[in-house]
Image (cartoon, rainbow, N blue to C red):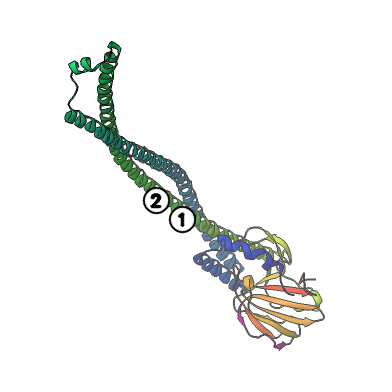
Amino acid sequence: MHRTTERRYVRAPLRAGLRPSAGLRALVTIVFAAGCLLSAAPDHDTLQAQSYRQRLTSIRSRQSQVQSRLKAIKGDQAEASSQLSAARNKAQQARDRANDAKQHLEEVRSILREVRAELVRTEEELAQERETASARLLALYQNGQPSYLEVVLNATSFEDFTNRAEISRIIAVQDQEILTTLVETEAKLSEQRETLEIAQVEAAQLKQQADAAKAEAEAAEREAQALLAKYQKDRRAAEADYAALEAAAKEVASFVRARASSSSGGGSAGSYSGSCAGNLMQPCGGRFTSRFGWRVHPILRTRRFHDGLDIAAGAGTTIKASDDGKVIFAGWKGPYGRAVIIDHGSGWSTLYGHCSALYVSAGQTVSRGQRIAAVGSTGWSTGPHLHWTVYRNGRTVNPLG
């Protein structure tokens, strides 16, 4: 029922890395605590203005330092991005060379397997031919090789003689040719095998070197990625610091302008004397620093709808219930920090945020003007103030009517 516009708009961006650092938050808190304490002493306007200006100068000095740091980080980030691009190219080239070396080794091994298989077949064939030739020689030895005279005498005709002589010559020549061819083939295959085995060793060494280069290049790529991520994180932190300082500077500057306007009788730039919405009572005294409606968010630095009224007051200033009612919430409420919500009946309810202390609990009945909390700077706050939201039938309305 009481989901506010402010909560809906500001939760997500801070998770993206825009939350100010603890040191800057402390600086901002000190600035506004001092400012609000000074506002309680209207007899010292001149001293207050001087104090505000001094603190504004201090904030601007810090901003200048953060800007210099941010500029250096951006330079480092650009260099790291360039290094990462080069490392990625080198790593890809190394992966390509490793893949080529692997493929080459596989091709050498495949050819070597084929040569070995062919050599085995040749050796088997050579052994068979040698066995055949040996059997023929053994038969000639046992039976006696026919002499030229026997061939002539045993021939039945001249043609028979010619045929017998030619057959003997052809058989002898074929045996010799077969044996010679097989021996030559065996020698060539053996030589090829030896060459391929050497090539295989060299290819394996080349692959090992390529794999090592690939691993080294990929390690360099990961290192470059980590370095770039670090600079990106540093940049986000510096940008968040600068945004917080800028918000603090603008708030202090608004205090200075408001004080100057008040001192010169410039009217009610930060105060209100009329009646509030629903005849509610203003919860505490102080200067209105941010009214209901659209504004540039002091932390996010983007245009957001402000669903309440911010009243600057010294830390610990009493916050009073705007009307009779029942406390329906008392505790931590996200960006509002410590907060109280009171249901006043007839569709009216109020929220009191950024409190430093709560003096009531859920379920408790309170009276108009009863002390319920103390001004603080909890949650998403740049200094001590009360964020006061008024609801009418569950919808936020302007607290000033």
Q: Position of residue 233 (x, y in %)?
A: 50, 57
The answer to which of marks 1 and 2 sits earlier in the sequence is 2
Mark 1 and mark 2: span between their CA atoms? 17 Å
Residue 99: which quarter of the image? top left
Residue at which label 2 appears: 219
Q: Nearer the viewer, residue 58 or 182?
A: 182
Give the mark toward the camera: 1 or 2.
2
Q: Badge 2: how crowded within 10 Å, few (<14), some, or many (20+)?
A: some
* Residue 289 at least partly seen: no
The three-letter amino acid code for the residue at tag 2 is: Ala
Q: Are marks 1 and 2 in contact (CB under 8 Å)?
A: no
Q: Quadrant of the N terminus?
A: bottom right
Q: Amino acid at mark 1?
A: Lys
Residue toward you, 305 or 298 = 305
Question: Would you name the residue on which mark 1 appears?
Answer: 230
Label 2 sits on a secondary structure element that is helix
* Residue 227 horizontal/vertical position (percent): 44, 52
Residue 198 is tagged as none
Left or right: 386 in relation to 216:
right
Residue at the extreme right: 346
Residue 51 in sight here: yes
Where residue 354 appears, as percent x and y from the top left, is 63, 74
Vertical order, 317 against 12 (above or below): below
Q: Dot 1 surroundings within 10 Å: few (below 14), some, or many (20 or more)?
A: some
Q: Is residue 78 above or below residue 1?
A: above
Q: Residue, x 17% and y 31% (percent of image)?
A: 142
Q: Secondary structure at mark 1?
A: helix
> Is residue 320 rendered magenta in the image?
no
Question: Could you tell whether 230 is left or right of 288 in the image?
Answer: left
Q: Where residue 357 appears, x then y in whole percent?
A: 60, 81
Span highlighted in magenta in the image: 356-366
